[in-house]
Image (cartoon, rainbow, N blue to C red):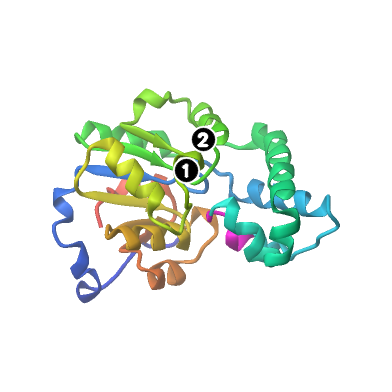
């Protein structure tokens, strides 16, 4: 079984005062719901509509960055320029058809309830479309009122790894000191750019070493582990 992994003390100097955290910014896909590989499948099917055949691993590695960046990252700027909007529309259609198979991770709701019971503001900070954030809430069996803020791609000009989503969520939450919980290096990088610590989960398919190298202050298997072991770095 994987053990929680954390930086050494020298690597965590920038998180001093984490005990004063008042807000937790939660990623959604791959963190709270087991959707990462469904997103990858939807993208592969979208690419296939234009006879594009990128490698699966390359598509998976980009899930979690904004869709406005993903096409160019996977297939190059020329494909983005010529087909980007069409591919994103095809992806939305494909993912919509897969939503019925997506489930919440064990411990996701428990973690959210624990954080709220501790008096923390809990915000959803997703780079996904609002439609799919709403779908995630249904999968979790929660309402938007559970959270002090809910953000989506439509709320910002630049998606992860830029910090805009996190910054907007924190501002709407009215918080001052935040910690991020996410599953990708894009989440970690986004948190780093905002200047807040990120706890990482492996449930999106990224490995411990690369999440730590990206700057995560702690890595566990999934949100269930955080619910059992506690969320603090």
**Residue at (69, 37) in percent of width and height:** 98
SS type, badge 2? helix
SS type, badge 1? loop
Q: Is any part of residue 155 visible from this angle?
A: yes
| Residue 201, quarter of picture | bottom left
Q: Residues within 10 Å of mark 1 (few under 14, many from 20)?
A: many
**Residue at (31, 58) in percent of width and height:** 194
Is 47 situated left or right of 162 in this image?
right
Query: Is residue 122 located in the magenta-colored stretch of the structure?
Result: no
Q: Nearer the viewer, residue 91 or 82?
A: 82
Residue picked out by circle 1: 28
Q: Position of residue 124 (x, y in %)?
A: 40, 39
Q: Nearer the viewer, residue 16 or 33?
A: 16
The N terminus sits in image quarter: bottom left
Q: Nearer the viewer, residue 232 or 127?
A: 127
Instruction: Write the start and end of the magenta stretch as one range.
Output: 60-65
Is 37 situated left or right of 13 in this image?
right
Q: Is any part of residue 115 visible from this angle?
A: no
Q: Residue furthest bottom?
A: 10
């Amino acid at each position: 079984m994987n053990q929680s992994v954390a930086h050494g003390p020298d690597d965590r100097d920038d998180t001093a005062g984490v005990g004063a955290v008042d807000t937790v910014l939660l990623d959604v896909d791959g963190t709270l719901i087991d959707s990462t590989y469904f997103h990858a499948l939807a993208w592969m099917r979208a690419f296939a509509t234009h006879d594009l055949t990128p490698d699966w691993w390359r598509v998976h590695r980009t899930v979690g960055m904004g869709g406005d960046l993903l096409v160019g990252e996977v297939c190059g700027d020329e494909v983005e320029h010529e087909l980007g909007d069409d591919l994103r529309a095809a992806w939305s259609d494909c993912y919509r058809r897969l939503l019925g198979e997506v489930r919440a991770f064990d411990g996701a709701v428990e973690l959210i309830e624990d954080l709220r019971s501790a008096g923390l503001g809990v915000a959803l900070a997703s780079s996904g479309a609002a439609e799919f954030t709403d779908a995630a809430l249904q999968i979790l069996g929660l309402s938007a009122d559970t959270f002090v803020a809910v953000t989506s791609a439509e709320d910002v000009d630049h998606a992860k790894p830029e910090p805009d989503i996190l910054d907007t969520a924190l501002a709407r939450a009215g918080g001052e000191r935040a910690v991020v919980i996410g599953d990708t290096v894009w989440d970690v990088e986004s948190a780093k750019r905002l200047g807040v610590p990120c706890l990482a989960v492996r449930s999106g398919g990224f490995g411990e070493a690369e999440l730590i190298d990206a700057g995560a202050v702690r890595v566990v298997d999934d949100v269930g582990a955080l619910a059992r072991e506690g969320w603090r770095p």
